[in-house]
Amino acid sequence: MLSPVKYLTRAGRGFNLLSCAAVIAMMLLSAADVFLRLLGKPIPGAYELVGFLGTIVVSFALAFTSMEKGHIAVEILVEKLPQRAQLAIVSLCNLIGALFFGVIACQAVLYALDIRKSGEVSLTLQIPPYPFILGIAAGCALLSLLLVADFIKSAQRTLDA
């Protein structure tokens, strides 16, 4: 039986695959639009689609980037502290990050529901943006859950040190 962390890890990898697919789609769409523009037949709504795909790229890659410790960390001052203090700071940062991205996820859901209720759509293609906003919420929620798991792990290491 898989632990909850394993499920989160699998979800993070799956989200990252979707993010990669969105990058490829953006690249192909942009290249096709440039080529067709040269022929006088640009793709209507290409700019909108690239924007929507961009939300998928960024929000769905968050969790995987965190899993791989791919974010920038400035540790000049922290590395001079004792090991236990370093672990405590990492634990606190994980907790703050989890809360921050949890709030973003909740607010994104509320915003998506508001946009859906208003019936707002994109200008050219008339695509409703709320599913993409819900995608942002999903990416942030997954990151928040992974940071909670990291917090628990790092708090345990702090207590053991």
Image: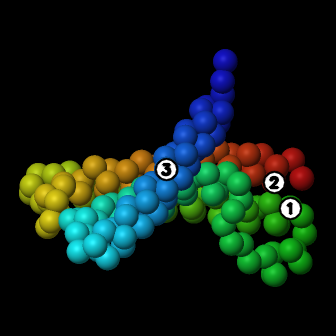
Q: For this rendering, which residue is in front, 80 or 27?
A: 27
Q: Which residue is identified by label 1?
A: 84
Graded by Cα atoms within 10 Å as few (under 14), some (14 to 19) or many (20 or more), the crowding at tag 1 reads some
Q: Residue furthest front?
A: 39
Total numbered badges shown on the rendered structure? 3
- Amino acid tagged 3: Ala
Tell me residue 121's x, y (percent).
14, 59
Q: Is residue 109 left or right of residue 53?
A: left
Q: Where 4 falls versus 116 (above or below)?
A: above
- Amino acid tagged 1: Arg
Q: Earlier in the sequence, mark 1 or mark 3?
A: 3
- Is mark 1 in CB contact (under 8 Å) with mark 2? yes
Q: Tag on residue 158? A: 2
Q: Where 55 falls versus 5 (above or below)?
A: below
- Amino acid tagged 2: Thr
Residue at x-position 28% and y-position 73%: 39
Q: Tag on residue 21? A: 3
